[in-house]
Amino acid sequence: MTVSSLSPVVPGVDAGARPERPSITELRLSAFAGHRNTFLPLGPLTLLAGRSGSGKTTALRAYEALAVLGGGARLDEAFPDPLGCVPERARPDAQRRRGFRIGCTADGPEGPVHLDVAVQAEPELRVVGERLTCGGLTLLETALVDPSRPVVQAAWHTAGSSPVTRGPLPDDRLGTALLPLRVAGKTDGQRRVLAAAEQMVVALRSVYACDPRPGRMRAAVPRGSGRLLRGCDNLADVLWRTRTECGRRHALLVGAVRDGCAGPVLDLLAEPVRDGAVRAVLDRGDGVRTALGLLGDGELRYLALALVLFTGPGVLEIDQVAEVPAALQTLTVLADGFDRALDPRQAGELVRLAARMCERGHIRLVGAVSDAAWAAGVAGATVVDLNRERS
């Protein structure tokens, strides 16, 4: 694996300054599916490049699973196919147990906070170990002590009359996400634990996984919530809502679509059809409108991803962190097949748009691409090359 960063040095910015908005800056796949001891640095705009089978989609799947766990979901919701996450050549132990290990780092006001999780996939799905650390100090550590009970033994930093507090936590959820419900915050040590856990949870939860499916974007759709689904199936419904909500943002979207689609583009809008449904169209000018159903797959994927970059969490189908002000959150878009069906010109336009949006700090993007050669020279992009020999 090789990493190339095209990020510029920003004059006047202290490299050691702590960011106000928590974000995931590293993904660790210690033993997950085809990955062994894989460490992926994540910048504001990161492209995971590699041929088919290099593990790009697997890495995004691990990131999304951590995000789901950070929201308080059960293990079976985060890992619907846990055996598929076990390394292929992992041998069961004497108790016929096999599993996998993943982790991440969240940077923010508390500095880098590290989370590592060991999951048992068989004979039953459960957390068997978790560690949350910051500044070389272990803030939370759990271990499976009694396999007959559905709990892990947890110990979290207290730094009061007792250095740690011990207690059971469920073995089907991420302990870090449960700490705000268990830690009182009466001592400096407990407050440090809470701050680190909250930083990790906020960084993980603000994730939107997106993989536009052109085949489903072409049809008219019924009016609904106006929140974009991960496959962008309901793009027309979202355009019906967003075109009138923010004229400036919509104008920017139209400009981006003009750069990525063939032919003139005066506007992008949704129009009503039968039975209360709406369809998306391109206004070509002079009264000519082209239904999105007539566009190619590359144009539709380009358009959908541009819409994601311009809209933000209020329009995307995600579990927002309502208890944290939006100004302190960063949305992370996970885009599998970021360059799928795009020609080099479209891919280049889209990554430049992503770089401009990510530079503002309110959005980050991790995209999987087959080849990132077209991203050369794009300031702010970090390319992680996953091409390697697979035994």
Image (spheres, rainbow, N blue to C red):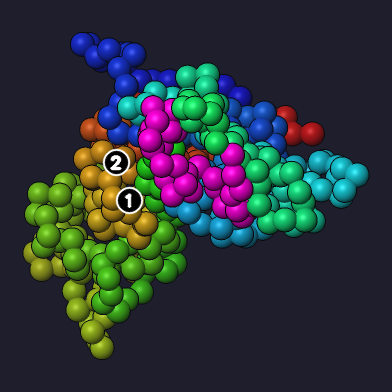
Q: Is residue 20 left or right of residue 229?
A: left
Q: Position of residue 29 (x, y in %)?
A: 62, 35
Tag 1, which secondary structure? loop
Residue at disc 2, secondary structure: loop
Q: Residue at x 74, y 34 (%)?
A: 390
**Does residue 93 appear anywhere in the picture?**
yes
Q: Quadrant of residue 78?
A: bottom right
Residue at point 26%, 38% (across, down): 328
> As displayed, is residue 386 above or below residue 154?
above
Query: Pointer 2: what residue?
Result: 329
Residue at x 27%, y 12% (from the top left corner): 14
Residue 137: within the magenta?
no
Mark 2 neighbour class, 10 Å CA radius: few under 14, some 14 to 19, many 20 or more: many
Pick the front one: 183 or 330: 183
Q: Is residue 3 visible?
A: no
Residues rendered magenta in the picture:
166-195
Q: Earlier in the sequence, mark 2 or mark 1?
A: 1
Is residue 171 part of the magenta span, yes or no? yes
Note whether 219 is above or below 10 in the view shown. Answer: below
Specify the farthest residue to the front.
161
Q: Nearer the viewer, residue 16 or 270?
A: 16
- Residue assigned mark 1: 321
Location of residue 118 (image quadrant): top right
**Among all residues in the image, which is located at the extreme bottom?**
275
Using the image as rendered, state which of residue 48 and residue 215 is in the foreground: 48
Distance between the Cα atoms at labels 2 and 1?
8 Å
Q: Position of residue 366 (x, y in %)?
A: 44, 39
Mark 1 and mark 2 in contact (Cβ < 8 Å)?
Answer: yes
